[in-house]
Image (spheres, rainbow, N blue to C red):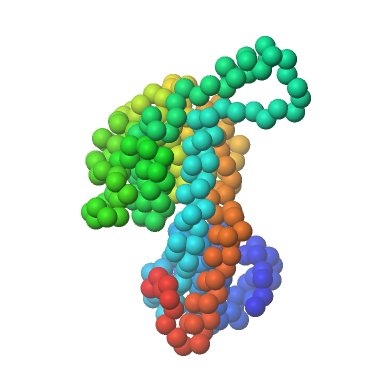
Amino acid sequence: MIECPSDDPRFASLLAEADALLVRTYTRVDDALLARAPRLRVVARAGVGLDNVDVPACTRRGVRVVSTPGANTRAVVELVFAFLLDALRPRVFLDRALDPESWKSLRRELQAPRQLCDLTLGVVGLGKVGSGVARVAAAMDMRVIYHDLLDIPGADRAGAQPVALDDLLARSDVVSLHVDARPGNRHLIGAAQLALCRPDCIILNTSRGFVIDAAALAAFLRTHPGASAVLDVHDPEPFGPDYPLLGLPNAHLAPHIGAATATANRNMSWVVRDLWRVLSGEEPEWPAN
């Protein structure tokens, strides 16, 4: 096994001899790359989403695609609630003693106007992560509603109630996005959808950056200072200095850290098992084609 970044000058020659390719998030596997890999038999995506892998193109060339669905589900669910509590609960940690009046004043300043059990959470996409978020929210006594293209069995909803997307946006104090990479989800949340949102809503996106129209969200946040957005994913990544959300006090931008735990990375690394199964002529456990 040879480790080589896709922008390394050695990559082209190594790719031409490769029987297997193991990628993470930002290596684009498409017809152009596959044309330079005549020996390739399997592409292993160490992660969940296959946004960067053209699965039909691989299938046309007889290249198997494998991934690790569910590997980072718990990590992303945890991050959603870390973001949400950051948005709801102002806090500081003391590094010096305070006089009694300063102590009282600080406690008054740090009083949160809302807590989780006061809020309605709208989950857009009730898949692995979305349903995990719904379960945690239910345990925190939040009211949970969701929108999904599929009819989700009641036993898999964690008590969440299905609603239309427009209804979800209008009713939710918190909107958490967990949709897949299908083209129809591009700018799923744009100016028209944001106009339905509450003026003090919290918008969380840990799915895909292109799901939100960043310019429309920036305009919404500027005109609704009581609202906030916490985004772990962006379009593009990394974003440049012209990113519309930069510099807004109520836009909080993270560098795509949803899977950034040792446990999730270890889980994703086990994609090598399926990679080896394919090379050994066996059927993989988690095939994508």
Question: Residue 161, image x and y in percent?
Answer: 26, 43
Instruction: Identify which residue, 52 or 34, lies in the foreground.
Output: 52
Q: Residue at x 29, y 46 (%)?
A: 159
Instruction: Identify which residue, 185 or 132, lies in the foreground.
Output: 132
Q: Residue at x 49, y 51 (%)?
A: 76
Question: Residue 275, image x and y in percent?
Answer: 52, 77
The answer to whether one can see residue 165 in this image is: yes
Left-right relation of 255 to 196: right
- For the C terminus, the image quarter is bottom left
Looking at the rendered structure, the number of numbered marks drawn on it comes to 0
Question: Residue 234, image x and y in percent?
Answer: 51, 44
Vertical arrangement, residue 207 with respect to residue 197, above or below:
below
The answer to whether one can see residue 213 in this image is: no
Left-right relation of 176 to 156: right
- For the N terminus, the image quarter is bottom right
In the rendered image, the residue lying farthest to the right is: 96
In the rendered image, the residue lying farthest to the front is: 100
